[in-house]
C-alpha cells in the first residue's frame, strides 16, 4: 500500500480523498494556489505544497510543477480527483516516467476514452448499444449534411475531444445544419485544440442514466446506476439512485462490465447512457475518474469507492465480487452551487454564516465553512448534500428537511431551485427528462 499520496486537486473532492487516505493510514499531501492557502484540505493535510501562479487555474494544471511537487514530498502516488488533470494522459505518462503511480486508468486508456469517436467504436465492439451516427469525424459541410440526412433529424453534433457539453449542437432541420457545424467546430477547436466533430441521432425525451464501474485492469464489476437527468447547461445539479429494475440493471450492467474489461480499465469509471421513451439505452461516454456524484452509489451500496480506487491503483485488485454488491434504499444528492437560482450565474464571495444539516441519513461533502471566500476562478460547487432513506419518497422528504436546515449567508446558491424541484409534481412522479428545466420554466422565473 502507498505510504504517501499527493492530491492534485482542491475543494470538496480534495477533502473527500484526504478522508479516505486518512482512514487507510496513508499520509496526504495537497497542492494549492494562493486562493486556497487557507482552505480546509490544505489545513487538514499532513503537508501542503504551494504552486504560485498568476492564473489561479494554472496551479492545478501545470503538469511539470505537480510532478516535481510529488517528487519533492516523496509521494508514492498522485490522486487527480475530477476535473483539472484527471483525464490527461500526458500527466499519467509523466508520473509513470518518474515511478509515481497515477491513481486512475493508464495513459493509453485515457487517450482511447478521451476521444469520443474511438470510445464509441470500442463500445460497439464490446456489445454496448450506441445511437446511430457518422462512421467517423466529419469536416466537409456537404458530406456531413448528407450523413445527417441519412441519420435523420434531429441530430446532435459533438466534439470528438469534448466534455461538459462544450462543442455540442442539436440541429432540428437541414437549413440550420451548416451554421451549427461551423459553430461546433469552432468551439471544439477553441476549447480542446481539436476541431474534429461527429454526428449522432439526437434522442428526444431522453433520461440520463449512468453506471458506476470499478476495474483492476482485467476484471471489472459494476455497483449499480445513478439517475442524472436534472441538468442545467448539460451539467448535472441533482442526482439519485437507484432507478432501474433489477432485470434491466443486470442486463445493462453486464454489458458495461464487458466494455470495461475490453479496454483493460483500471480504477473508478462511470459509463453514461441516454434512455429514450421506449426504454432503449444509447451509450454517451465513459468518465475515467471518480465522479462528482459517486456519493449516491456509496450511500446505496455502503462501499467507500475512493478507498477501493486507491487499493486497486496499489495493485490489490477489486476487494469485492459482483455478488457482494447489494442495492438498498434510495439516495439523492443536491449540488449546492454558488449560483443565482434564477439566472444560474456564478455568485462568488465570502460566507458570513455557514451551517450544514445533519441527522440520520444525511451526509454533507464540503470544503466550505463560515468565513470561507468562494473564489470566482473555479467551479461554483460549494457542497454536496446527500441523503439516504428506505424509499424515494422518504429520501425526498429528508432532502427537503436537510435543505431547510442549511444556512449560507454571503452568496447566492441553488438551494431555492432544488427546493422548487423537490416539490414539482413531475419530479415527484418520476416523469423526468434531460430537458426538465426547459420543460418547467416556472422553476427559473420565480413562479414556484
Image: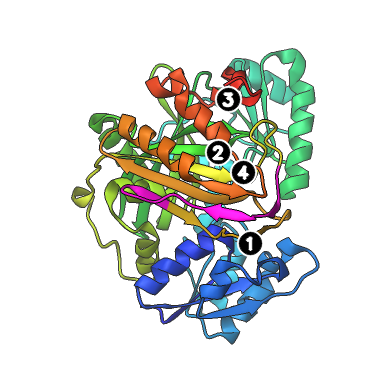
Label placed on residue 163: 4
Residue 226 in view here: no
Decide whether the magenta segment is chiefly helix, strand or loop: loop
| Residue wearing tag 2 | 415
Element marked by disc 3: helix
Which residue corresponds to the image point at 37% horizontal and 60% vertical from the top-left? 217
Q: What distance separates the C-alpha of mark 4 from that of mark 2?
A: 26 Å
User: Where residue 57 sits: x, y (%)?
Assistant: 71, 61
In this rendering, which labeled residue sits more in front, label 1 or label 4?
1
**Horizontal arrangement in the rendering, residue 271 relative to residue 177 (left or right):** left
Q: How is the image coloured?
A: rainbow
Element marked by disc 2: helix
Q: Nearer the viewer, residue 234 or 90?
A: 234
The answer to which of marks 1 and 3 sits earlier in the sequence is 1
| Quarter location, residue 258 | top left
Q: What distance separates the C-alpha of mark 3 from that of mark 2?
A: 15 Å
In this rendering, which labeled residue sits more in front, label 4 or label 2?
2
| Residue wearing tag 1 | 371
Q: What distance separates the C-alpha of mark 1 from that of mark 4?
A: 33 Å
Element marked by disc 1: loop
Question: For the magenta stretch, what is the residue range?
Answer: 346-363
Whether the magenta-drawn stretch holds residue 68 is answered as no
**Horizontal arrangement in the rendering, residue 343 relative to residue 153 (left or right):** right
Residue 40 in view here: yes
Q: What distance separates the C-alpha of mark 1 from that of mark 3?
A: 32 Å
Contact between labelled residues 2 and 3, with CB atoms less than 8 Å apart: no
The answer to which of marks 3 and 2 sits earlier in the sequence is 2
| Residue wearing tag 3 | 437
Amino acid at each position: 500500500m502507498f505510504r504517501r499520496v499527493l492530491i492534485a486537486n482542491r475543494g470538496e473532492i480534495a477533502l473527500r480523498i484526504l478522508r479516505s487516505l486518512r482512514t487507510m493510514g496513508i499520509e496526504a499531501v495537497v497542492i494549492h494556489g494562493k486562493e486556497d492557502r487557507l482552505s480546509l484540505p490544505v489545513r487538514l493535510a499532513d503537508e501542503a505544497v504551494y504552486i504560485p501562479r498568476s492564473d489561479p487555474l494554472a496551479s492545478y494544471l501545470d503538469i511539470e510543477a505537480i510532478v516535481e511537487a510529488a517528487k519533492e514530498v516523496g509521494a508514492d502516488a498522485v490522486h487527480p480527483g475530477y476535473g483539472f488533470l484527471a483525464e490527461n494522459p500526458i500527466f499519467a505518462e509523466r508520473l509513470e516516467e518518474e515511478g509515481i503511480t497515477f491513481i486512475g486508468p493508464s495513459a493509453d486508456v485515457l487517450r482511447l476514452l478521451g476521444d469520443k469517436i474511438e470510445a464509441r467504436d470500442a463500445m460497439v465492439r464490446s456489445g454496448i448499444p450506441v445511437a446511430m451516427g457518422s462512421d467517423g469525424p466529419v469536416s466537409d459541410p456537404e458530406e456531413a449534411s448528407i450523413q445527417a440526412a441519412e441519420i435523420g433529424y434531429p441530430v446532435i453534433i459533438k466534439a470528438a475531444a469534448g466534455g461538459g457539453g462544450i462543442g455540442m449542437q442539436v440541429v432540428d432541420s437541414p437549413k440550420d445544419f451548416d451554421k451549427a457545424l461551423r459553430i461546433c467546430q469552432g468551439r471544439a477547436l477553441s476549447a480542446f485544440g481539436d476541431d474534429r466533430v461527429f454526428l449522432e441521432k439526437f434522442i428526444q425525451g431522453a433520461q440520463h442514466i449512468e453506471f458506476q464501474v470499478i476495474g483492476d485492469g482485467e476484471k471489472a464489476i459494476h455497483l449499480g446506476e445513478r439517475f442524472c437527468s436534472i441538468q442545467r447547461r448539460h451539467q448535472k445539479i441533482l442526482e439519485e439512485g437507484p432507478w432501474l429494475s433489477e432485470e434491466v440493471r443486470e442486463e445493462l450492467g453486464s454489458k458495461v462490465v464487458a466494455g470495461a474489461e475490453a479496454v483493460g480499465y483500471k480504477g473508478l469509471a462511470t459509463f453514461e447512457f441516454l434512455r429514450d421513451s421506449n426504454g432503449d439505452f444509447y451509450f454517451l461516454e465513459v468518465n475515467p475518474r471518480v465522479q462528482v456524484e459517486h456519493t449516491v452509489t456509496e450511500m446505496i451500496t455502503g462501499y467507500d469507492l475512493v478507498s477501493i480506487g486507491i487499493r486497486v491503483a496499489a495493485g490489490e485488485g477489486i476487494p469485492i465480487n459482483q455478488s457482494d454488491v447489494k442495492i438498498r434504499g434510495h439516495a439523492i444528492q443536491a449540488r449546492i452551487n454558488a449560483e443565482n437560482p434564477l439566472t444560474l450565474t456564478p455568485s462568488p464571495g465570502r460566507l458570513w454564516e455557514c451551517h450544514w444539516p445533519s441527522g440520520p441519513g444525511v451526509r454533507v461533502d464540503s470544503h466550505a465553512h463560515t468565513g470561507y471566500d468562494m473564489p470566482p476562478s473555479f467551479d461554483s460547487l460549494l457542497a454536496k448534500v446527500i441523503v439516504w432513506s428506505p424509499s424515494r419518497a422518504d429520501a425526498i422528504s429528508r432532502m427537503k428537511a436537510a435543505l431547510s436546515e442549511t444556512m449560507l449567508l454571503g452568496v447566492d446558491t441553488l438551494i431555492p431551485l432544488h427546493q422548487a424541484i423537490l416539490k414539482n409534481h413531475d419530479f415527484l412522479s418520476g416523469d423526468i427528462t434531460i430537458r426538465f428545466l426547459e420543460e418547467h420554466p416556472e422553476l427559473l422565473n420565480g413562479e414556484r
